[in-house]
Image (cartoon, rainbow, N blue to C red):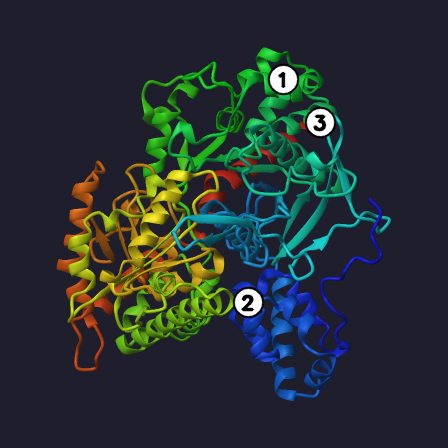
Amino acid sequence: MKRDPSANIAIPKLPQKIEGLGEIALNLWWTWNPKGKNLFRLLNPYLWKESGHNPIEMLKRVPDKEMEKLTSNESFMREYRYVYALFKEYMSDRTVYTEEEPLPIAYFCAEYGLHHSVPIYSGGLGFLAGDILKESSDMGLPMVGIGFMYPQGYVRQIIGSDGWQNGTNEPINRDIAPIERVLDKNGDYFTIQVPFIDPPVYASVWKINVGRVTLYLLDTDIKRNDPWDREISSRLYTPDMNQRLRQQIVLGIGGYRVLEELGIEYSILHLNEGHPAFALFERVRAFIENEAMTLDEAVEAVRKSSIFTTHTPLQAGTDVYGFDMMSHYFEDYWKRLGMDKERFMEFGMNPDKPKSGFNMTVLGLKMCGFRNAVSKKHRDVTREIWRSVFDHDTPSKVPIDYITNGVHIPTWVGDELFEELDRTLGENWLHMQDNDDVWTRLYELDDRKIWEIHYIYKVRMVNFIRERVRRKWADEGIDPLVAMAEGVMLDPDVLTIGFARRMTEYKRPDLILHDLNRLEKIVNNFARPVQIIFSGKAHPSDNPGKRILQHIFKTAQDPRFRGRIAFVEDYGESVAKYLVRGCDVWLNNPLIPMEACGTSGMKAAMNGTIHCSSLDGWWPEGYNGKNGWAFGGEVSDNDADAAALYDTIEQKIVPLFYDLDERNVPAGWVKMMKESMISISPRFSARRMMKEYLKKFYIPISKEIQKERGERR
């Protein structure tokens, strides 16, 4: 595709002395480095805030004269030179924090949560993928990412006065996003034709610099495609199953072709969920055509070098396509691979439901020799629900391992706390962040200091929520009850419980509203009040989730709760950071065993927000009796679990929070904050997670490939 000479350039022309600002702005490295963020804040504090902490948008709005003036500001220039030096040193450092370096890895995922200026994510799966890329960059791992651009982004949530979720698309503003066009050798937009879709479908390619890792994003929204085809990559998880199948063909087969045509060599294929699993077939095709392998040899080579990570706790949560639909798109393809229809379809056939269609999770499980669930409990659940795929009656024999998810600490820990960790743990603590012994020095941190930092986050969160309501009132003239429901009456001095995640039935977002009379007494306790903040989106097609959300919103509008229940609209990366840092308690109460892992509680705990959860997902591994609270039984029951939650709040949480010492600090509470941070941060960091991927998968695969290459020589 020819390059449009009138296309906007992401970064405006900058004075030569500070040209490096553009280089930093186009690399998400700054998003997890406090000094990088502070540099842009120093540039223009007001525009930094108004741009939503988006340096590209800010650089476009700073007047040229102000930019020139900055080059004469020695204080700013010293900071600029220092931060730019840190950035260049980071980009050139190839240290791998492991004894052995793996062969190159291609990581495929349908969504990535990296920064709110690039809304190509819907929830936890995307944030996990984003954290994996960031941690791989920090560790110097040879990884490349593949995903979708999604020009229309994910749903932007708008709550009506009746509490019903109304969604509009949140288009990516390409002029102010940290994305770049990939160009071919002639300087034109790099474009591929996706194989085996007729009429032809084309995709242009963008890239995002995630530190030292590059993420390539496919985009079918180009003039060369017919309107129907342009819509393939327009939004996440389209409900139209035919279009979703085409989307996954583009992601898997087209994504593989992007790497092939760019000449990016890799040895390990890592699939995050089933959406990109067609890349496995394309890899078989490449082995047959490029390595002169037989079909069986190619399939075995793919199995030996591919990893499948599943996040699904039940069979019904997988993508399944009718056999007729699959035949329409893949008849020529399976012939090219040397297969007949029966063998091709068998790769995606679920033995429990052989007539249901082609199952993408089954494809990943069958064609990847390395498979993992995302928590220990999820492994047990996954082995049980997929044991027939491996023809095992005993779940313990099913060859599915687990690597519990972790989160990228530099991204999610607040700046003030980050600086305090530098002082308390030593400036090299990040290099040893997964070492339990490093974190024990937090016991020495003064209680008042850690409480002051937490209170800063709490005030900042409340001010952020109030400011959103103020702007909505100024723009739309909203009803006072809506303003109350959206948090205008929140108080930073009140014990605050947060519940923020996807609004869907199995997560039971409204469990705490189960007995409103009892909840009213808890919330409105005159001496020891409680406030609750909810946030989260329901999938556009999830009407039961929308009804739960509406119930929450209407409860927040109820005057008897006096504004102490709030729903924060349009949950995303930016809102999440305020909530995980500013809430006192992080609540999680899924139907057991439906939570594969969950990571928001990890992010909260690392910031001193204490986790309160039923024992599902990662919490059975994280809870030690001193670092938070667990409630409910092994089998979920709404009546019993709600009663247990109320008991926990009334008898344990409230008394501990309001028990202040002579310095007006809740010493017992701070003790639990420290225990939470010390016990959870190293064990549930992305560093620990990636080291486990190295030990269990990346290094063994690399050794086997190198051994086979040596034998062939």
The local secondary structure at tag 3 comes to loop
Q: Quadrant of the N terminus?
A: top right
Q: Nearer the viewer, residue 392 or 448?
A: 448
- Give the mark nearest the N terminus, 3 or 1: 3
Q: Mark 2 falls on what kind of element?
A: loop
- Could you say which is closer to the camera, residue 504 or residue 669? 504
Tag 1 residue: 327
Disc on the earlier residue, 3 or 2: 2
Q: Residue 11 appears at what percent x and percent y?
A: 72, 66
**Residue type, numbered disc 3:** Ile
Q: Amino acid at mark 1?
A: Ser
Rounded to the nearest angstrom, the CA distance separating label 3 from label 1 is 12 Å
In the rendering, which numbered label is found on residue 52?
Answer: 2
For residue 696, side relative to residue 191 (left or right):
left
User: For this view, does 291 lie left or right of residue 122?
Assistant: right
Q: Residues within 10 Å of mark 2 (few under 14, many from 20)?
A: few
Disc 1 to disc 2, how far (Cα)?
47 Å
**Does residue 99 appear in the picture of this structure?**
no
Badge 1, how many Cα within 10 Å: few under 14, some, many 20+?
some
Q: Quadrant of the C terminus?
A: top right
How far apart marks 3 and 2 lie (CA) works out to: 40 Å
Which residue is drawn at the image coordinates 25% and 58% (left, top)?
627
Comes first in the chain, label 1 or label 2 = 2
The quarter holding residue 479 reads bottom left
- Mark 1 lies on a secondary structure that is helix
Q: Position of residue 677 (x, y in %)?
A: 32, 62
Please state which amino acid type lies under the numbered disc 2.
Gly
Is residue 653 left or right of 198 when viewed as pictured? left
Q: Where does the image place residue 152, in percent across and percent down from the top left?
A: 61, 48
Q: Which label is found at residue 197? A: 3
